[in-house]
Amino acid sequence: MSGTNLDNPRQEIEEAIASGNLSKLLRMNGMLHGHFCPFSAMGVKAAVCAVRELGVRSTGMEETVAIVETNNCFSDGVQLVTGCSFGNNALIYRDFGKTAFTLARRNGDAVRISVRADRVMEERSPETMQLFERVVVERSGSESDKKRLSELWTELSFRVLELPDDEVFNIKKITIDVPAYARIFGSVKCSVCGESIMEPRARVKDGKAICIPCSGQEYYQLAGDGISIKQEEPDGKKSA
Ligand SMILES: [Zn+2]
Ligand SMILES: [Zn+2]
C-alpha cells in the first residue's frame, strides 16, 4: 500500500477509530478476513468501543492486550482494530467459545465486551436464513445461491454496525491481572531435522536437542475446533 505511513502503519486505522468510521474499518478488515459477515462486524464494532473506552493505541509491542474468548470471525475484527494480533503476542486466546473479548492496559484497567448474538441474528431476513441453511449448514446450494447469500451477508454486516452499542453488547469495566510480556528466548537446532526451535519448545533425546514433531511428543494445536492435544505418529502420519 503506497499510502502507508512508515512511522505509524496504523495511522489510517487510528483515524477511522477516532472519527467512528466503522464501515471503513470493516472494509479494511475484509482484507484480513476475506469476506464480510455479521460477527467480524461485531468484532470491529466491539473493538472500537473498547479502544475508545480505554483511550489506548497499539504499536504491536504489547502495551495493550486483547483477550479473545472465541476463534470465530469476531476475533479478526478485534485483531485489526485493536492491533493486538496472534503474531505480536498481544492477543491472548481463551478457549471458551464465547463471542466476547477483553481489552486491557498494562496496569490492569480493562473493558470486557460480550456480544448479544441473538440480537444480531434478529437482523437476518428470512431469505438470508434460508440461504444460510442451504449454503453454509447443508453445504449445498447453487452458485447463484452462494452469490446472493454473499450479497445479503455483506449488506447485513454493514447494517449491524449501526445498531446501538447497548443493544448488541454487554460492556463491563473491570480490572484484570495482565499476563507478563512475552519473554525473548534463544534458539537451538533440532538434532534430527536441523530446523531451529525456540529453546523452551526443544526436547532432549540421547542428550541432544530435538523438536517436538521429531520427538513424537504431545503438543497443543489451535484449530477450528479450539485447542486440542495432538501427537505425531512415529511413521510421520499426523493423528486425527
Ligand atoms: Zn466471517
Ligand atoms: Zn526436528
Image (cartoon, grey):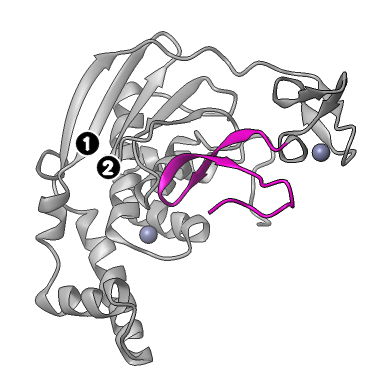
Q: Return the residue nearer the eye: 142 or 207.
A: 207
Tell whether label 1 touches label 2 (CB within 8 Å). Answer: yes
Q: Which residue occupies 38% across, 40% down?
A: 17
Dot 2 surroundings within 10 Å: few (below 14), some, or many (20 or more)? many
173 w.r.t. 127: above or below: above
Q: Quadrant of ligand 1?
A: bottom left
x and y percent of residue 67 in the render?
39, 29
Q: Which residues are magenta?
A: 216-240
x and y percent of residue 92 in the render?
46, 29
Q: Which residue occupies 66% across, 33% down?
A: 217
Q: Amino acid at mark 2?
A: Thr
Q: Which residue occupies 75% across, 25% down?
A: 202
Q: Is residue 175 left or right of residue 201?
A: left
221 w.r.t. 55: above or below: below
Instruction: Please give the residue where the numbered disc 2 appears in the rendered image.
Output: 99
Let me know if residue 238 is in the magenta part.
Answer: yes
- Image quadrant in which you'd find residue 156: bottom left
28 w.r.t. 89: above or below: below
Give the label on residue 114, or none: 1
Cα–Cα gap, marks 2 and 1: 6 Å
